[in-house]
C-alpha cells in the first residue's frame, strides 16, 4: 500500500492517499435521538462540499448514528472532513433545535474500502441499514450513481 499512515486514539485509523472510506459516528450517549428535521439538516451538511472536498458515494442518517462512504479530495484529509461534519452539525442543531452539550461521540469508526467487492458491500450495508428499522424509509438514504 502506498502512503499508508496509521495512528491510534481509542480506535486505529488507517489513511492512504486516494482511498475510499466507510465512516460511522454516533450520538453522544444519553442524547435524544435525531428528529426528522435534524436528519434533514445533517443531510444538507453532508452534501454541502460534495465534489469540492470529497466524493460522496453513499450515506444514511439514522436516529442515533450516521454512515458515509466517501473519497476525500486530493488535498483534504478524512479527519478534516469528519471533524467539519460533526462540529458544524452540532453547532447547527444546538442553535436551531436547542440541543445542549456534546452531540456526537468524539471518535468515529473508519475503514479503508480495499476493493470493489468491499465497496459494494459497504454501499449495500449503508443502503440496507434503515430498512432494518424502518422498512418504508427512503428519504435519508442516497447512493451516488455507479457507472
Image (cartoon, grey):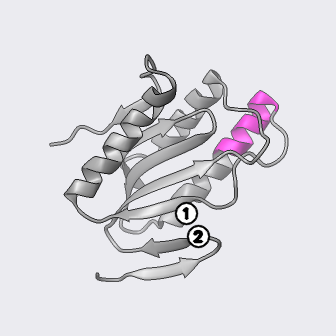
Q: Nearer the viewer, mark 2 or mark 1?
A: 2
Q: Does the magenta stretch include residue 117?
A: no
Left or right: where 138 falls relative to 145: right
Coordinates of residue 140 in the picture (x, y in percent)? 47, 28
Comparing 108 with 16, the one in front is 108
Check disc 1 and report its element: helix, strand or loop.
helix
In which quadrant of the rendered view does residue 139 lie? Answer: top left
Q: Mark 2 points at which residue?
A: 11
Coordinates of residue 6 in the picture (x, y in percent)? 48, 81
- Between the residue at mark 2 and the residue at mark 1, the CA separation in whole angstroms equals 17 Å
Magenta stretch prevailing secondary structure: helix
Comparing 48 with 99, the one in front is 99
Q: Which residue is drawn at 42% across and 22% down?
A: 138
Q: Mark 1 points at which residue?
A: 80
Residue furthest to the left: 147
In this rendering, the answer to whether 79 lies above or below 57 is: below
> Which region shows up in magenta?
89-98
Residue 5 in view here: yes
Amino acid at each position: 500500500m502506498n502512503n499508508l499512515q496509521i495512528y491510534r486514539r481509542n480506535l486505529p485509523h488507517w489513511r492512504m492517499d486516494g482511498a475510499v472510506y466507510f465512516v460511522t459516528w454516533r450520538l453522544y450517549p444519553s442524547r435524544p435521538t435525531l428528529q426528522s428535521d435534524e436528519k434533514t439538516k445533517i443531510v444538507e451538511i453532508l452534501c454541502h462540499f460534495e465534489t469540492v472536498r470529497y466524493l460522496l458515494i453513499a450515506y444514511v442518517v439514522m436516529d442515533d448514528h450516521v454512515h458515509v462512504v466517501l473519497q476525500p479530495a486530493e488535498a483534504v484529509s478524512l479527519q478534516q472532513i469528519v471533524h467539519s461534519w460533526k462540529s458544524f452539525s452540532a453547532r447547527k442543531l444546538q442553535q436551531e433545535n436547542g440541543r445542549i452539550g456534546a452531540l456526537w461521540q468524539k471518535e468515529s469508526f473508519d475503514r479503508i474500502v480495499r476493493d470493489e467487492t468491499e465497496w459494494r458491500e459497504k454501499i449495500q450495508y449503508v443502503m440496507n441499514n434503515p430498512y432494518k428499522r424502518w422498512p418504508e424509509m427512503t428519504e435519508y438514504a442516497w447512493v451516488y450513481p455507479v457507472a
